[in-house]
Image: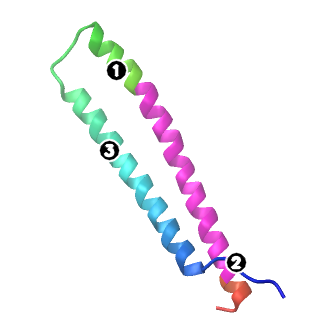
Amino acid sequence: MSTVHANPDDLQRFAKQVRETEKQIGDLKRKVEATLRSLDWDDPVKRRVDEQLGTILRTITTASQKLDGQAREIDKKAQQLRVFLGH
């Protein structure tokens, strides 16, 4: 007989935490963008910061979007475990 080495409730809690992390990342990203836009600053350093931060924030956005996919995959596994365990 097969044994299960996971708890569906734990997996769902983890998926929720992953989603919350995604939201927090998005909130922080928007805060940085808003602050940067609000600065009264225009010189070559600001333009370089804008460019470099833009690259960083796009990378963060891509990673954050992948978190959602991971959360969905974890939820799916939790549901499969529930069916397997008869819950």
Let me know if residue 55 is in the magenta part.
yes
Query: Where does the magenta region start and end?
Result: 54-81
Residue farthest along the right direction in this orientation? 1
- Specify whether 3 is left or right of 20: right
Residue, disc 2? 80
Residue type pointed to by label 2: Gln
Name the residue carrying label 1: 50
Residue 82, by quadrant, is: bottom right
Q: Quadrant of the N terminus?
A: bottom right
Look at 35% across and 14% down and name the residue there: 48
Q: Residue at x 51, y 68 (%)?
A: 14
* Relative vertical location of residue 10 with respect to residue 24 in this rendering, above or below: below
Q: Position of residue 46 (x, y in %)?
A: 27, 15
Q: What kind of element bears circle 3?
A: helix
In the rendered image, the quadrant that contains the C terminus is bottom right
Mark 2 packing: few (<14 Cα in 10 Å), some, or many (20+)?
few
